[in-house]
Amino acid sequence: MGREGEVVGELIAAWDAQHDDVKVNVQQIPWSAAHEKLLTAHVGRATPDLAQLGNTWVPEFAALRALAPLDEWVERSQVVARDDHFPGIWDTNVIDGTLYGVPWYVDTRVIFYRTDLLAAAGHDSMPTTWTAWRNALADIARLGGAGKYGVLLPLNEWTQPVILGLQAGSPLLGDSDTRAAFGEPAFAGAFDYYLGLYKDGLAPPVANNEVANLYQEFARGTFAMYISGPWNLGEFKRRLPEELQDKWGTAPLPGPDSGAPGVSLAGGASLVVFAGSKHQQKAWELVEYLSAPAQQQKFFELTGDLPAHRAVWADPRLSGDERTRAFATQLERVVATPKIPEWEQIANRVWVAAEQAVRGSHTPAEALAALDKDVDRMLVKRRWLRERGQLGNGGDKR
């Protein structure tokens, strides 16, 4: 999938050379088609032996019993160990206490920001708390004048309100992931903070498709901050003008309290072995090979994807780069979103509710009430099954 699919052949070639009895066929699938193709393969009992899987897909494929449990293999492994991985990322692969994937590369969200605009507004460093961050955004917007904002939070992205909710301690869902919890105080308080950034003119009320060119507007100072992932490290270097290359940085997300960064999302992709594979032992050996620090290092060089193994982060190209180090700090404080197959559908409903509240078609209370009602409807079958003892947390029908 993606760039990973283009370069993994280089890693596999070395493994093939060491295994005369095994020939690995790599099939490259675009991200846009991968989910449907893998589901179709499962239904048709034609899954591959192993695959790269987005870690938010793991709960769904685990619920379908498409994936092989990996706990026993990891317990015996000399290569793959839980302690070598970021805890929040590892947790995305654990469904109802069973491990179904090994993190291959990781991502999360941090703040990309204009260091010069922050300094001009009177702030020597990136704020670490919600209150200080909001004050800095206000100072930047005041300094910039009309048409200038502190931060871009696109209205068609669910990540920002969800991250703020998680930082405030919201579980997002309640009753063992069978009911919505967006109207409860933790998420509602974070939602008010999020809406306040628009209400006070610190964030423009626009969606991504209303911003003609993100990098040009960042360079123009239309907004000074943007929450994004590691793929934008390269994009900012390529797309910002030369005179701005020493005027932007990255930082872990502020949190509601002082003392530690706020949590962020646990993203990335994992290696999984399919339950229908007739070559599970060899598939696991390939997972171990691809997970070894040497291959993780090579994979980073080929793709720029951030390595899942903490040991690889000692490499000077990662530890010596201040912008990349922000991701290392943040990755120690990431949490999984609800690990149920319905989550991606629910997440897309979150940004709809947020946009309704920002644009004023609903009051905040009305937007959250409607969100809770929609999510409860999505989860009605889950509640019915759980009440009858037929459902685990990951959605597996017992």
Image: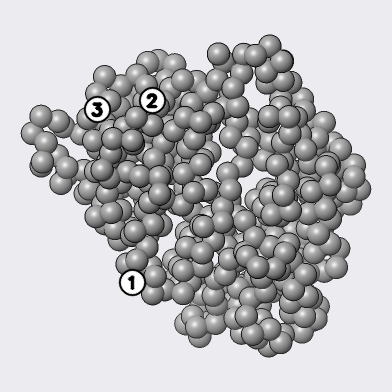
Q: Mark 3 or mark 2: name the one nearer the start of the chain.
A: 2
Q: Which of the 4 image quarters holds residue 79?
A: top left
The answer to whether the residue labelled 3 contacts the one labelled 2, judged by CB atoms less than 8 Å apart, is no
Coordinates of residue 265 in the picture (x, y in percent): 58, 51
Three-letter code for the amino acid on which mark 1 is drawn: Pro
For label 3, the residue is 281
Q: Nearer the viewer, residue 115 or 177?
A: 177
Q: Which residue is mark 1?
A: 316
Q: CA distance from mark 3 to mark 2?
A: 11 Å
For the residues labelled 3 and 1, say whether their Cβ atoms are less than 8 Å apart. Answer: no
**Quarter in which the N terminus is drawn:** top left
Q: Residue furthest top?
A: 388
**Percent of width and height locating residue 154:** 69, 57
The percent position of residue 163, horizontal first and vertical second, equals 67, 52
Q: In the picture, which quadrant includes the C terminus?
A: top right
Separation of disc 3 and disc 1 at Cα?
35 Å
Residue 83 higher or lower than 94, as above or below: below
State left or right for residue 265 relative to residue 276: right
Which callout, 3 or 1, points at the residue further toward the start of the chain? Answer: 3
Q: Residue at x 89, y 52 (%)?
A: 360
At 22% across and 30% down in the image, what residue appears? 282
Query: Which residue matches tag 2?
Result: 68
Q: Secondary structure at mark 1?
A: helix
365, 235: nearer the viewer = 365
Vertical arrangement, residue 91 with respect to residue 380, above or below: below
Provide residue 336's location: percent of width, then percent of height.
58, 44
